[in-house]
Amino acid sequence: MTRMTTSHIAHLATYNEWMNRKLYAAAAALPAERVHEDRGAFFGSIFGTLSHLVIADVIWLKRIAAGVPGLASLRCLDDVPRPASLDQRLCADLPELDALRVKLDAAILAFSAEVTPAQLDGPLAWTSMKGVASTKRLGDVLLHVFNHQTHHRGQATTLFSQLGVDVGPTDILLLLPDVAS
């Protein structure tokens, strides 16, 4: 497997924020009942899907903060409660969820500027919500975190499409810099 680099992390963090802004803008343009309407997705609704992404990011960022001491970028999450389940609702409505999403994305961007190659190659140990202990390379865990986000944002874009909402282009390629040939 190709090792994740700080450059990869920075690109993925930027893409993550860009896509989240697009999805939250699309959600904000819909009536609240449509955002909360159960559409048969893994987490029911658009809100449920966006909420799950927030929950997963909080869980992983707290694991990273505990496993890689001294990261100033993640201290802003000290006041965010640790979720008890993957479908828990930390926020009651879209504006509250959006505010937490903005906070998480800022932390991820700051983390991407702070993390070192040695930290990416180092171990991250944690215990899952089911009590299973694991240790993996931090860079590999981050690959999972960003892939998980992309997976569920893909589901969210499908839910928007079912409602006739086009969130626009979603390819990371649009954010990658051109290089001279």
Image (cartoon, rainbow, N blue to C red):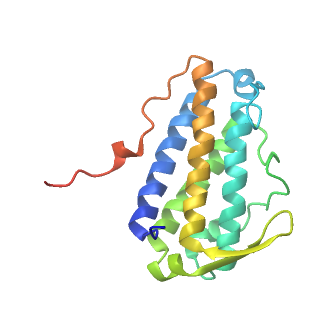
Q: Residue furthest top?
A: 164
Left or right, residue 115 beside residue 90: left
Left or right, residue 172 beside residue 154: left
At 56% from the left edge and 68% from the top edge, which residue is drawn?
140
Instruction: Reply above or below: 92 against 78.
Output: above
- Choose between 15 and 78: the one closer to the eye: 15
Instruction: Reply above or below: 162 against 175.
Output: above
x, y percent for residue 53: 67, 48
Left or right, residue 60 beside residue 5: right
- Choose between 69 and 97: the one closer to the eye: 69
Q: How many marks?
A: 0
At 44% from the left edge and 53% from the top edge, which residue is drawn?
14
Left or right, residue 60 beside residue 118: right
At 71% from the left edge and 21% from the top edge, which residue is drawn?
34
x, y percent for residue 145: 60, 58
Q: Which image quarter holds the C terminus? A: bottom left
x, y percent for residue 38: 78, 26
Specify the quadrant of the image occupied by residue 92.
Answer: top right
Q: Residue furthest front?
A: 1
At 50% from the left edge and 42% from the top edge, which residue is drawn?
19
- Choose between 58 and 96: the one closer to the eye: 58
Specify the quadrant of the image occupied by residue 40.
Answer: top right
x, y percent for residue 65: 65, 73
Instruction: Reply above or below: 6 against 84.
Output: below
